[in-house]
Image: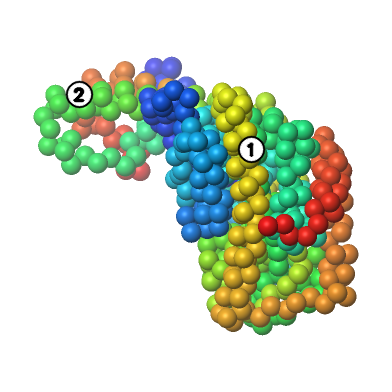
Protein backbone atom coordinates (compact mmCIF):
# COMPACT_ATOMS: atom_id res chain seq x y z
CA UNK A 1 0.00 0.00 0.00
CA UNK A 2 1.39 3.38 -1.00
CA UNK A 3 1.91 6.13 1.52
CA UNK A 4 -0.72 8.11 -0.31
CA UNK A 5 -3.32 5.41 0.04
CA UNK A 6 -2.46 4.82 3.69
CA UNK A 7 -2.95 8.51 4.38
CA UNK A 8 -6.21 8.59 2.44
CA UNK A 9 -7.50 5.59 4.37
CA UNK A 10 -6.67 7.25 7.66
CA UNK A 11 -8.64 10.37 6.70
CA UNK A 12 -11.57 8.25 5.48
CA UNK A 13 -11.55 6.18 8.66
CA UNK A 14 -11.57 9.30 10.81
CA UNK A 15 -14.51 10.78 8.90
CA UNK A 16 -16.38 7.46 9.02
CA UNK A 17 -15.78 7.29 12.77
CA UNK A 18 -17.37 10.72 13.21
CA UNK A 19 -20.30 9.57 11.04
CA UNK A 20 -20.70 6.45 13.16
CA UNK A 21 -20.68 8.51 16.36
CA UNK A 22 -23.30 10.82 14.80
CA UNK A 23 -25.47 7.79 14.02
CA UNK A 24 -25.16 6.57 17.61
CA UNK A 25 -25.90 10.06 18.94
CA UNK A 26 -28.94 10.23 16.70
CA UNK A 27 -30.36 7.05 18.23
CA UNK A 28 -29.36 8.30 21.68
CA UNK A 29 -31.20 11.60 21.25
CA UNK A 30 -34.39 9.81 20.22
CA UNK A 31 -34.31 7.63 23.35
CA UNK A 32 -33.30 10.53 25.59
CA UNK A 33 -36.08 12.67 24.12
CA UNK A 34 -38.71 10.05 24.92
CA UNK A 35 -37.37 9.50 28.44
CA UNK A 36 -37.22 13.21 29.24
CA UNK A 37 -40.65 13.81 27.80
CA UNK A 38 -42.30 11.08 29.86
CA UNK A 39 -40.34 11.35 33.10
CA UNK A 40 -39.73 15.06 33.59
CA UNK A 41 -41.91 16.64 30.86
CA UNK A 42 -38.92 18.65 29.66
CA UNK A 43 -37.78 17.48 26.22
CA UNK A 44 -34.64 18.77 24.55
CA UNK A 45 -36.24 21.22 22.15
CA UNK A 46 -32.98 21.68 20.26
CA UNK A 47 -32.38 17.99 19.59
CA UNK A 48 -34.58 17.84 16.50
CA UNK A 49 -32.85 20.75 14.77
CA UNK A 50 -29.44 19.45 15.89
CA UNK A 51 -30.27 16.11 14.29
CA UNK A 52 -31.32 17.60 10.95
CA UNK A 53 -28.62 20.28 10.85
CA UNK A 54 -25.66 18.29 12.12
CA UNK A 55 -26.13 14.57 12.75
CA UNK A 56 -27.85 13.66 9.48
CA UNK A 57 -25.41 15.77 7.48
CA UNK A 58 -22.49 14.03 9.19
CA UNK A 59 -23.95 10.52 8.77
CA UNK A 60 -24.41 11.07 5.05
CA UNK A 61 -21.48 13.18 3.88
CA UNK A 62 -18.67 12.10 6.16
CA UNK A 63 -19.36 8.43 5.43
CA UNK A 64 -19.35 8.88 1.63
CA UNK A 65 -15.66 8.18 0.88
CA UNK A 66 -15.49 5.20 3.24
CA UNK A 67 -18.61 3.71 1.64
CA UNK A 68 -17.07 3.99 -1.82
CA UNK A 69 -13.89 2.35 -0.62
CA UNK A 70 -15.87 -0.48 0.97
CA UNK A 71 -17.91 -0.91 -2.21
CA UNK A 72 -20.98 -0.63 -0.01
CA UNK A 73 -23.01 1.71 -2.19
CA UNK A 74 -26.12 0.31 -3.76
CA UNK A 75 -25.28 -0.93 -7.26
CA UNK A 76 -27.69 -2.22 -9.83
CA UNK A 77 -25.52 -4.81 -11.51
CA UNK A 78 -27.99 -7.05 -13.30
CA UNK A 79 -26.75 -5.96 -16.72
CA UNK A 80 -23.16 -5.43 -15.56
CA UNK A 81 -22.79 -9.04 -14.43
CA UNK A 82 -23.84 -10.39 -17.80
CA UNK A 83 -21.32 -8.27 -19.70
CA UNK A 84 -17.97 -9.59 -20.84
CA UNK A 85 -15.01 -8.47 -18.71
CA UNK A 86 -13.80 -5.98 -21.30
CA UNK A 87 -17.20 -4.24 -21.40
CA UNK A 88 -17.31 -4.26 -17.61
CA UNK A 89 -14.05 -2.33 -17.51
CA UNK A 90 -15.48 0.26 -19.87
CA UNK A 91 -18.51 0.55 -17.61
CA UNK A 92 -16.18 1.10 -14.66
CA UNK A 93 -14.36 3.87 -16.46
CA UNK A 94 -17.52 5.64 -17.64
CA UNK A 95 -19.17 5.24 -14.25
CA UNK A 96 -16.00 6.42 -12.53
CA UNK A 97 -15.70 9.53 -14.68
CA UNK A 98 -19.37 10.41 -14.09
CA UNK A 99 -18.93 9.89 -10.35
CA UNK A 100 -15.84 12.13 -10.35
CA UNK A 101 -17.75 14.88 -12.15
CA UNK A 102 -20.62 14.60 -9.69
CA UNK A 103 -18.31 14.63 -6.67
CA UNK A 104 -16.46 17.64 -8.09
CA UNK A 105 -19.74 19.52 -8.58
CA UNK A 106 -20.80 18.57 -5.06
CA UNK A 107 -17.51 19.80 -3.62
CA UNK A 108 -17.69 23.05 -5.56
CA UNK A 109 -21.32 23.59 -4.56
CA UNK A 110 -20.55 22.77 -0.94
CA UNK A 111 -17.69 25.27 -0.87
CA UNK A 112 -19.93 27.96 -2.41
CA UNK A 113 -22.66 27.21 0.13
CA UNK A 114 -20.28 27.29 3.09
CA UNK A 115 -18.44 30.38 1.87
CA UNK A 116 -21.79 32.15 1.38
CA UNK A 117 -23.00 31.26 4.87
CA UNK A 118 -19.65 32.39 6.29
CA UNK A 119 -19.56 35.67 4.39
CA UNK A 120 -23.18 36.54 5.23
CA UNK A 121 -22.67 35.59 8.87
CA UNK A 122 -25.81 33.40 8.82
CA UNK A 123 -26.78 32.41 12.35
CA UNK A 124 -30.20 31.20 13.55
CA UNK A 125 -31.35 33.81 16.08
CA UNK A 126 -31.38 32.66 19.70
CA UNK A 127 -34.70 31.76 21.30
CA UNK A 128 -35.74 29.27 18.63
CA UNK A 129 -35.40 25.52 18.66
CA UNK A 130 -32.31 25.72 16.49
CA UNK A 131 -28.98 26.12 18.20
CA UNK A 132 -27.68 29.58 17.56
CA UNK A 133 -24.52 28.27 15.89
CA UNK A 134 -23.18 29.70 12.64
CA UNK A 135 -24.68 27.91 9.65
CA UNK A 136 -21.25 27.22 8.12
CA UNK A 137 -20.37 24.88 11.00
CA UNK A 138 -22.95 22.49 9.59
CA UNK A 139 -22.50 23.04 5.85
CA UNK A 140 -18.71 22.61 6.03
CA UNK A 141 -19.27 18.87 6.33
CA UNK A 142 -20.57 18.83 2.75
CA UNK A 143 -17.38 20.03 0.97
CA UNK A 144 -15.27 18.09 3.48
CA UNK A 145 -16.92 14.74 2.78
CA UNK A 146 -17.26 15.46 -0.94
CA UNK A 147 -13.62 16.49 -1.36
CA UNK A 148 -12.33 13.28 0.23
CA UNK A 149 -14.87 11.37 -1.86
CA UNK A 150 -13.47 13.05 -4.96
CA UNK A 151 -9.93 11.98 -4.07
CA UNK A 152 -11.11 8.42 -3.41
CA UNK A 153 -13.02 8.28 -6.71
CA UNK A 154 -10.00 9.56 -8.62
CA UNK A 155 -7.87 6.96 -6.90
CA UNK A 156 -10.34 4.20 -7.74
CA UNK A 157 -10.48 5.40 -11.34
CA UNK A 158 -6.72 5.46 -11.62
CA UNK A 159 -6.11 2.09 -9.98
CA UNK A 160 -9.14 -0.15 -10.21
CA UNK A 161 -9.80 -0.52 -13.94
CA UNK A 162 -6.62 -2.55 -14.16
CA UNK A 163 -7.92 -5.01 -11.59
CA UNK A 164 -10.51 -7.72 -12.24
CA UNK A 165 -13.96 -6.36 -11.43
CA UNK A 166 -14.75 -9.44 -9.36
CA UNK A 167 -12.50 -8.03 -6.67
CA UNK A 168 -14.42 -4.78 -6.49
CA UNK A 169 -16.22 -5.38 -3.23
CA UNK A 170 -13.45 -4.70 -0.75
CA UNK A 171 -13.13 -6.93 2.32
CA UNK A 172 -14.88 -4.30 4.44
CA UNK A 173 -18.07 -4.81 2.46
CA UNK A 174 -18.75 -8.17 4.03
CA UNK A 175 -17.48 -7.21 7.46
CA UNK B 1 -35.85 26.06 10.59
CA UNK B 2 -33.07 25.40 8.13
CA UNK B 3 -32.74 21.85 6.97
CA UNK B 4 -29.25 22.02 5.70
CA UNK B 5 -29.30 18.50 4.39
CA UNK B 6 -32.09 19.53 2.10
CA UNK B 7 -30.03 22.51 1.06
CA UNK B 8 -27.59 20.19 -0.56
CA UNK B 9 -30.30 18.46 -2.51
CA UNK B 10 -31.46 21.87 -3.64
CA UNK B 11 -27.92 22.65 -4.63
CA UNK B 12 -27.68 19.54 -6.74
CA UNK B 13 -30.96 20.46 -8.35
CA UNK B 14 -29.69 23.99 -8.86
CA UNK B 15 -26.62 22.75 -10.70
CA UNK B 16 -28.84 20.80 -13.05
CA UNK B 17 -31.40 23.53 -13.52
CA UNK B 18 -28.94 26.37 -14.06
CA UNK B 19 -27.69 24.62 -17.15
CA UNK B 20 -31.23 24.08 -18.39
CA UNK B 21 -32.15 27.66 -17.63
CA UNK B 22 -29.17 28.97 -19.55
CA UNK B 23 -29.99 26.75 -22.49
CA UNK B 24 -33.59 27.93 -22.68
CA UNK B 25 -33.20 31.67 -23.07
CA UNK B 26 -35.56 33.39 -20.67
CA UNK B 27 -35.83 36.41 -22.91
CA UNK B 28 -38.27 35.31 -25.57
CA UNK B 29 -39.44 37.72 -28.28
CA UNK B 30 -37.79 41.17 -28.04
CA UNK B 31 -38.96 43.05 -24.98
CA UNK B 32 -40.63 40.12 -23.26
CA UNK B 33 -39.28 38.43 -20.16
CA UNK B 34 -40.11 35.04 -18.71
CA UNK B 35 -39.74 34.76 -14.95
CA UNK B 36 -39.67 31.55 -12.94
CA UNK B 37 -41.91 31.64 -9.85
CA UNK B 38 -41.50 29.01 -7.14
CA UNK B 39 -43.21 28.28 -3.84
CA UNK B 40 -43.98 25.43 -1.48
CA UNK B 41 -47.76 25.52 -1.40
CA UNK B 42 -50.18 23.10 -3.04
CA UNK B 43 -52.27 24.79 -5.70
CA UNK B 44 -55.39 24.66 -3.51
CA UNK B 45 -53.70 26.74 -0.79
CA UNK B 46 -54.72 30.43 -0.68
CA UNK B 47 -51.07 31.49 -0.86
CA UNK B 48 -50.83 29.69 -4.19
CA UNK B 49 -54.30 30.43 -5.55
CA UNK B 50 -54.77 34.00 -4.33
CA UNK B 51 -51.07 34.80 -3.95
CA UNK B 52 -48.77 33.41 -6.62
CA UNK B 53 -51.34 32.80 -9.34
CA UNK B 54 -53.17 36.06 -8.77
CA UNK B 55 -49.84 37.91 -8.90
CA UNK B 56 -48.78 36.18 -12.10
CA UNK B 57 -52.10 36.94 -13.80
CA UNK B 58 -52.03 40.60 -12.74
CA UNK B 59 -48.41 41.12 -13.75
CA UNK B 60 -49.04 39.58 -17.18
CA UNK B 61 -52.06 41.82 -17.62
CA UNK B 62 -50.38 45.02 -16.42
CA UNK B 63 -47.35 44.41 -18.60
CA UNK B 64 -49.50 43.81 -21.66
CA UNK B 65 -48.10 40.30 -21.95
CA UNK B 66 -44.46 41.38 -21.90
CA UNK B 67 -43.98 39.59 -18.60
CA UNK B 68 -44.46 35.84 -18.83
CA UNK B 69 -44.22 33.43 -15.93
CA UNK B 70 -43.45 29.80 -15.32
CA UNK B 71 -45.01 28.89 -12.00
CA UNK B 72 -43.75 25.92 -10.00
CA UNK B 73 -45.87 25.28 -6.86
CA UNK B 74 -45.64 22.55 -4.20
CA UNK B 75 -41.87 22.55 -3.67
CA UNK B 76 -41.34 21.55 -7.31
CA UNK B 77 -38.09 23.51 -7.32
CA UNK B 78 -37.02 22.77 -3.75
CA UNK B 79 -37.94 23.09 -0.10
CA UNK B 80 -38.88 26.51 1.34
CA UNK B 81 -35.69 26.46 3.43
CA UNK B 82 -33.69 26.62 0.17
CA UNK B 83 -35.50 29.40 -1.62
CA UNK B 84 -33.04 32.14 -0.69
CA UNK B 85 -30.21 30.00 -2.04
CA UNK B 86 -32.20 29.07 -5.15
CA UNK B 87 -33.07 32.70 -5.88
CA UNK B 88 -29.42 33.63 -5.42
CA UNK B 89 -28.16 30.88 -7.73
CA UNK B 90 -30.62 31.82 -10.48
CA UNK B 91 -32.95 28.83 -10.35
CA UNK B 92 -35.95 30.88 -9.19
CA UNK B 93 -36.60 34.50 -10.17
CA UNK B 94 -39.59 35.17 -7.91
CA UNK B 95 -39.42 32.97 -4.81
CA UNK B 96 -41.68 32.43 -1.84
CA UNK B 97 -39.47 33.64 0.97
CA UNK B 98 -40.79 33.05 4.49
CA UNK B 99 -38.62 34.40 7.32
CA UNK B 100 -39.85 31.59 9.58
CA UNK B 101 -38.20 29.03 7.31
CA UNK B 102 -34.93 30.89 6.88
CA UNK B 103 -34.42 32.59 10.23
CA UNK B 104 -30.63 32.32 9.91
CA UNK B 105 -30.70 34.35 6.68
CA UNK B 106 -33.53 36.76 7.56
CA UNK B 107 -33.47 36.97 11.38
CA UNK B 108 -34.91 40.46 11.77
CA UNK B 109 -38.02 39.65 9.75
CA UNK B 110 -39.06 37.35 12.60
CA UNK B 111 -40.55 40.53 14.07
CA UNK B 112 -43.69 39.79 12.08
CA UNK B 113 -44.22 36.51 13.92
CA UNK B 114 -43.96 37.96 17.42
CA UNK B 115 -47.00 37.44 19.67
CA UNK B 116 -49.74 40.00 20.20
CA UNK B 117 -49.61 41.51 16.72
CA UNK B 118 -52.70 42.29 14.68
CA UNK B 119 -55.22 39.44 14.39
CA UNK B 120 -56.44 40.70 11.04
CA UNK B 121 -54.49 39.29 8.07
CA UNK B 122 -55.04 42.48 6.06
CA UNK B 123 -53.91 44.79 8.79
CA UNK B 124 -50.91 42.57 9.51
CA UNK B 125 -49.84 42.39 5.86
CA UNK B 126 -50.40 46.06 5.07
CA UNK B 127 -48.48 47.09 8.18
CA UNK B 128 -45.52 45.00 7.02
CA UNK B 129 -45.56 46.47 3.52
CA UNK B 130 -43.59 49.67 4.32
CA UNK B 131 -41.03 47.66 6.32
CA UNK B 132 -40.42 45.40 3.31
CA UNK B 133 -40.48 48.25 0.77
CA UNK B 134 -37.26 49.84 -0.49
CA UNK B 135 -35.67 51.69 2.42
CA UNK B 136 -37.82 49.88 4.99
CA UNK B 137 -35.99 48.37 7.93
CA UNK B 138 -36.56 44.72 6.94
CA UNK B 139 -35.56 45.42 3.36
CA UNK B 140 -32.37 47.17 4.48
CA UNK B 141 -31.31 44.67 7.14
CA UNK B 142 -32.58 41.34 5.75
CA UNK B 143 -33.77 41.21 2.16
CA UNK B 144 -31.48 43.63 0.28
CA UNK B 145 -28.25 42.06 1.62
CA UNK B 146 -29.52 38.71 0.31
CA UNK B 147 -30.28 40.26 -3.09
CA UNK B 148 -34.06 40.07 -2.65
CA UNK B 149 -36.89 42.54 -3.17
CA UNK B 150 -40.24 41.62 -1.62
CA UNK B 151 -43.23 42.20 -3.92
CA UNK B 152 -46.09 40.42 -2.14
CA UNK B 153 -46.69 40.06 1.60
CA UNK B 154 -49.00 37.48 3.18
CA UNK B 155 -49.68 36.76 6.83
CA UNK B 156 -51.56 33.95 8.52
CA UNK B 157 -52.47 35.42 11.89
CA UNK B 158 -54.04 33.80 14.90
CA UNK B 159 -51.74 31.16 16.34
CA UNK B 160 -53.73 29.60 19.16
CA UNK B 161 -53.09 26.97 21.83
CA UNK B 162 -54.76 23.76 20.66
CA UNK B 163 -54.83 20.96 23.20
CA UNK B 164 -55.89 17.33 23.32
CA UNK B 165 -57.33 15.08 25.98
CA UNK B 166 -60.03 17.55 26.98
CA UNK B 167 -57.56 20.03 28.46
CA UNK B 168 -59.21 23.47 28.45
CA UNK B 169 -56.91 26.46 28.20
CA UNK B 170 -58.28 29.88 29.07
CA UNK B 171 -55.48 31.42 31.07
CA UNK B 172 -51.75 31.59 30.28
CA UNK B 173 -51.14 29.71 33.56
CA UNK B 174 -53.00 26.72 32.08
CA UNK B 175 -50.19 25.94 29.67
CA UNK B 176 -47.39 26.07 32.25
CA UNK B 177 -45.74 22.67 32.48
CA UNK B 178 -47.28 21.34 29.28
CA UNK B 179 -45.44 20.16 26.22
CA UNK B 180 -46.52 21.90 23.06
CA UNK B 181 -45.43 21.10 19.56
CA UNK B 182 -44.01 24.31 18.19
CA UNK B 183 -43.18 25.26 14.63
CA UNK B 184 -39.86 26.83 15.60
CA UNK B 185 -38.40 30.30 15.46
CA UNK B 186 -40.24 33.00 17.34
CA UNK B 187 -43.07 30.64 18.36
CA UNK B 188 -40.62 28.53 20.39
CA UNK B 189 -39.65 31.54 22.40
CA UNK B 190 -43.31 32.35 23.12
CA UNK B 191 -44.07 28.79 24.20
CA UNK B 192 -41.06 28.78 26.49
CA UNK B 193 -42.01 32.10 28.05
CA UNK B 194 -45.45 30.76 28.89
CA UNK B 195 -43.75 28.09 30.98
CA UNK B 196 -44.40 25.28 28.53
CA UNK B 197 -41.79 23.12 26.78
CA UNK B 198 -41.60 23.52 23.02
CA UNK B 199 -41.35 20.17 21.24
CA UNK B 200 -39.96 20.18 17.73
CA UNK B 201 -41.44 17.65 15.33
CA UNK B 202 -42.54 17.66 11.71
CA UNK B 203 -46.08 18.93 11.42
CA UNK B 204 -47.03 15.68 9.71
CA UNK B 205 -46.47 13.86 13.03
CA UNK B 206 -48.62 16.29 14.95
CA UNK B 207 -51.94 14.44 14.60
CA UNK B 208 -50.60 11.23 16.06
CA UNK B 209 -48.61 13.00 18.78
CA UNK B 210 -51.67 14.89 20.04
CA UNK B 211 -53.96 11.86 19.68
CA UNK B 212 -51.59 9.67 21.70
CA UNK B 213 -50.74 12.33 24.24
CA UNK B 214 -47.07 12.42 23.24
CA UNK B 215 -47.53 16.18 23.38
CA UNK B 216 -50.30 18.02 25.20
CA UNK B 217 -51.05 20.21 22.22
CA UNK B 218 -49.62 22.70 19.79
CA UNK B 219 -49.50 26.36 18.91
CA UNK B 220 -50.95 26.73 15.43
CA UNK B 221 -53.41 28.71 13.35
CA UNK B 222 -56.78 27.18 12.33
CA UNK B 223 -55.83 27.51 8.68
CA UNK B 224 -52.74 25.36 9.23
CA UNK B 225 -54.50 22.92 11.56
CA UNK B 226 -57.28 21.99 9.16
CA UNK B 227 -55.24 20.21 6.47
CA UNK B 228 -53.91 17.90 9.21
CA UNK B 229 -57.45 17.36 10.58
CA UNK B 230 -56.36 18.38 14.04
CA UNK B 231 -60.02 18.59 15.03
CA UNK B 232 -59.99 14.80 15.20
CA UNK B 233 -56.99 14.65 17.52
CA UNK B 234 -57.27 17.84 19.57
CA UNK B 235 -60.27 18.76 21.69
CA UNK B 236 -59.85 22.39 22.70
CA UNK B 237 -58.47 25.62 21.37
CA UNK B 238 -58.19 29.21 22.48
CA UNK B 239 -59.56 31.91 20.23
CA UNK B 240 -57.87 35.27 20.29
CA UNK B 241 -54.63 34.42 22.09
CA UNK B 242 -52.68 35.54 19.02
CA UNK B 243 -49.42 33.87 20.03
CA UNK B 244 -47.82 34.46 16.68
CA UNK B 245 -48.21 34.54 12.92
CA UNK B 246 -46.77 32.98 9.84
CA UNK B 247 -45.45 35.47 7.31
CA UNK B 248 -44.53 34.94 3.69
CA UNK B 249 -43.36 37.11 0.85
CA UNK B 250 -42.99 36.59 -2.86
CA UNK B 251 -39.66 38.23 -3.55
CA UNK B 252 -37.86 38.86 -6.81
CA UNK B 253 -34.11 38.42 -7.09
CA UNK B 254 -32.38 41.79 -7.56
CA UNK B 255 -30.28 40.38 -10.41
CA UNK B 256 -33.51 39.85 -12.38
CA UNK B 257 -35.07 43.11 -11.22
CA UNK B 258 -32.09 45.16 -12.42
CA UNK B 259 -32.41 43.67 -15.90
CA UNK B 260 -36.03 44.75 -16.31
CA UNK B 261 -37.03 48.05 -17.96
CA UNK B 262 -38.69 50.59 -15.59
CA UNK B 263 -42.21 50.05 -16.94
CA UNK B 264 -42.04 46.32 -16.21
CA UNK B 265 -40.63 47.04 -12.75
CA UNK B 266 -43.64 49.27 -12.18
CA UNK B 267 -45.99 46.54 -13.42
CA UNK B 268 -44.46 44.04 -10.98
CA UNK B 269 -44.65 46.49 -8.07
CA UNK B 270 -48.27 47.29 -8.87
CA UNK B 271 -49.18 43.60 -9.26
CA UNK B 272 -47.51 42.95 -5.89
CA UNK B 273 -49.44 45.67 -4.11
CA UNK B 274 -52.72 44.41 -5.56
CA UNK B 275 -51.91 40.81 -4.69
CA UNK B 276 -51.10 41.68 -1.06
CA UNK B 277 -54.53 43.29 -0.77
CA UNK B 278 -56.37 40.49 -2.52
CA UNK B 279 -54.51 37.73 -0.70
CA UNK B 280 -55.16 38.99 2.81
CA UNK B 281 -58.90 39.01 2.21
CA UNK B 282 -58.72 35.46 0.88
CA UNK B 283 -56.64 34.34 3.87
CA UNK B 284 -59.15 35.89 6.29
CA UNK B 285 -62.04 34.14 4.54
CA UNK B 286 -60.19 30.82 4.41
CA UNK B 287 -59.22 31.11 8.06
CA UNK B 288 -62.81 31.72 9.10
CA UNK B 289 -63.92 28.73 7.06
CA UNK B 290 -61.17 26.60 8.61
CA UNK B 291 -62.36 27.59 12.08
CA UNK B 292 -65.91 26.57 11.19
CA UNK B 293 -64.79 23.24 9.80
CA UNK B 294 -62.64 22.53 12.84
CA UNK B 295 -65.56 23.39 15.11
CA UNK B 296 -67.83 21.11 13.09
CA UNK B 297 -65.16 18.41 13.44
CA UNK B 298 -65.33 18.64 17.23
CA UNK B 299 -62.66 21.17 18.18
CA UNK B 300 -64.11 23.42 20.88
CA UNK B 301 -62.90 27.02 20.54
CA UNK B 302 -62.96 29.09 23.68
CA UNK B 303 -63.24 32.76 22.81
CA UNK B 304 -61.10 34.62 25.30
CA UNK B 305 -62.88 37.27 27.36
CA UNK B 306 -61.35 40.76 27.49
CA UNK B 307 -59.95 40.03 30.96
CA UNK B 308 -58.40 36.76 29.80
CA UNK B 309 -57.08 38.47 26.70
CA UNK B 310 -55.38 41.08 28.83
CA UNK B 311 -53.64 38.33 30.82
CA UNK B 312 -52.35 36.69 27.62
CA UNK B 313 -51.02 40.04 26.41
CA UNK B 314 -49.17 40.52 29.69
CA UNK B 315 -47.83 36.97 29.65
CA UNK B 316 -46.25 37.32 26.20
CA UNK B 317 -45.09 40.93 26.56
CA UNK B 318 -41.58 39.92 27.72
CA UNK B 319 -41.16 37.83 24.56
CA UNK B 320 -40.98 40.95 22.41
CA UNK B 321 -38.45 42.61 24.67
CA UNK B 322 -36.25 39.53 24.76
CA UNK B 323 -36.45 39.33 21.00
CA UNK B 324 -35.37 42.97 20.68
CA UNK B 325 -32.46 42.36 23.06
CA UNK B 326 -31.34 39.27 21.10
CA UNK B 327 -31.48 41.14 17.79
CA UNK B 328 -29.54 44.11 19.14
CA UNK B 329 -26.92 41.66 20.45
CA UNK B 330 -26.63 40.25 16.92
CA UNK B 331 -26.05 43.82 15.71
CA UNK B 332 -29.50 44.11 14.12
CA UNK B 333 -31.96 46.99 14.61
CA UNK B 334 -34.51 45.00 16.61
CA UNK B 335 -35.94 48.03 18.39
CA UNK B 336 -36.46 49.94 15.16
CA UNK B 337 -38.11 46.93 13.51
CA UNK B 338 -40.57 46.40 16.37
CA UNK B 339 -41.37 50.10 16.76
CA UNK B 340 -41.83 50.53 12.99
CA UNK B 341 -44.16 47.56 12.82
CA UNK B 342 -46.27 48.66 15.78
CA UNK B 343 -46.49 52.18 14.38
CA UNK B 344 -47.48 50.85 10.96
CA UNK B 345 -50.15 48.64 12.52
CA UNK B 346 -51.61 51.65 14.25
CA UNK B 347 -51.53 53.58 10.99
CA UNK B 348 -53.37 50.86 9.07
CA UNK B 349 -56.87 51.13 10.38
CA UNK B 350 -59.22 48.24 9.95
CA UNK B 351 -59.41 45.63 7.24
CA UNK B 352 -58.93 47.20 3.82
CA UNK B 353 -60.28 45.10 0.95
User: What chain does badge 2 belong to?
Assistant: A
In the picture provided, is B93 more to the left or to the right than B303?
Answer: left
In the picture provided, is A112 more to the left or to the right than B346?
Answer: left
Contact, mark 1 vs mark 2 (Cβ under 8 Å): no
What label does residue A114 carry, if any?
none
Secondary structure category for the residue under label 1: helix
Secondary structure category for the residue under label 2: helix
Front one among B99 and A34: B99
In the picture provided, is A52 more to the left or to the right than B348?
Answer: left
Front one among A89 and A6: A89
Q: How many labels does the image show?
A: 2
Q: Can residue A133 be seen in this view?
A: no
User: What chain does badge 1 belong to?
Assistant: B
State the separation of the CA atoms marked 1 and 2: 56 Å
Q: Where is residue A62 in the image (x, y as percent from the top left)?
A: 50, 35
Q: Is B23 placed above or below B301 here?
A: above
* Number of other residues with Cα within 10 Å of mark 2, as a class: few under 14, some 14 to 19, many 20 or more: few
Q: Is A39 placed above or below B26 here?
A: below
Q: Position of residue B107 (x, y in %)?
A: 72, 42
* Number of other residues with Cα within 10 Å of mark 1, as a class: few under 14, some 14 to 19, many 20 or more: some
Q: Which residue is drawn at 72% across and 40% down?
A: B132
Q: In which quarter of the image is residue A34?
A: bottom right
Q: Residue beneath label 1, please?
A: B269
Q: Position of residue B40 (x, y in %)?
A: 52, 49
Q: Which residue is drawn at 57% across and 50% down?
A: B51
**Which mark is nearer the camera, 1 or 2?**
1
What label does residue A90 carry, if any?
2
Q: Which residue is drawn at 55% across and 57% down?
A: B46
Same subunit, labels 1 and 2: the answer reads no
Amino acid sequence: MSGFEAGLRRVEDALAAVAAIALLALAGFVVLGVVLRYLVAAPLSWAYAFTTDYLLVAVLFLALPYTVRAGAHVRIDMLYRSLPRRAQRWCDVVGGVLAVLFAAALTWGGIALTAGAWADGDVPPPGGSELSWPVWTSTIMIPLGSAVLLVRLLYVLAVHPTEPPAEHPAPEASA
Amino acid sequence: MAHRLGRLLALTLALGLVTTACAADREGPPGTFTLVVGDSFPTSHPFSRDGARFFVARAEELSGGRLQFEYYPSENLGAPQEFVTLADSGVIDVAMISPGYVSAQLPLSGVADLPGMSTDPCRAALALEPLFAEGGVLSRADFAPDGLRPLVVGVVTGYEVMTGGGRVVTDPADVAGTQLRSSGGTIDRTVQDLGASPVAMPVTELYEAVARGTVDGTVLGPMSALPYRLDEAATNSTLGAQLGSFTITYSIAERVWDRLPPDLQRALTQAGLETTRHLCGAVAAYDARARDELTAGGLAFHELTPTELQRWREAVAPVREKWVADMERMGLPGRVALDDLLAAQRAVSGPTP
